[in-house]
Amino acid sequence: MEWLWDVVAEPVLADLGIDGPPSAGQQPPRVWWCPTGLLTMLPLHGAGYHASGDGRTVLDRVVSSYTPTLRALREAMKPSADDMVGDASLLFVGVPEAPD
């Protein structure tokens, strides 16, 4: 879980500007994970340094959800005619030539 934090989860959360647990009384943001390849077999939501107790875990910082494809997420998040969507955004992180 620590390796997964160092290599995948923390860099993504840092790019999103999530550098620590939410303040007391604040709701944590939701992150939709869309893993591909071998990452689909790893529990991204469980990444972190759980024994340290210093907030360096995905569980401490965000509410995790998974989507099988970006298209599925886009379709699921389409507002109906009756709904209004606030400041929704989507971040795609692609690594075309990842080592190992």
Image: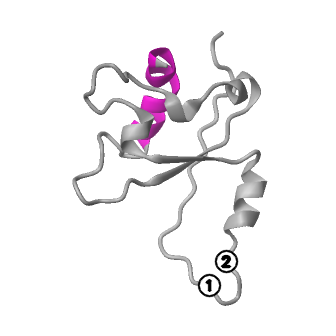
Tell me the kind of residue under disc 1.
Asp
Tell me the kind of residue under disc 2.
Pro
**Which of 11/28 is in front?**
28
**Which of 99/29 is in front?**
29
**Which of 11/1 is in front?**
1
Residue 65 part of the magenta segment: no
**Is residue 11 shown above or below 34?**
above
Q: What element carries label 1?
A: loop
**Is residue 98 shown above or below 62?**
above
Q: Residue furthest top?
A: 100
- Identify residue for label 1: 83
Left/right placement of residue 27 relative to residue 33 reads left
Magenta segment main secondary structure = helix
- Residue under the image location 77 percent in, 56 percent down: 72
**Do labels 2 and 1 touch, CB within 8 Å?**
yes
Give the residues drawn in magenta, as a range: 2-15
Left/right placement of residue 42 relative to residue 63 reads right
Q: What percent of the width, then of the height, locates residue 12?
A: 48, 36
Q: What percent of the width, then of the height, locates residue 61?
A: 37, 43
- Residue under the image location 76 percent in, 45 percent down: 68
Q: What percent of the width, then of the height, locates residue 43?
A: 60, 29
Q: How far apart are marks 2 and 1 (CA)?
A: 5 Å
- Residue under the image location 36 percent in, 46 percent down: 17
- Identify residue for label 2: 79
Q: How crowded is mark 1: few (under 14 residues within 10 Å), some or many (20 or more)?
A: few
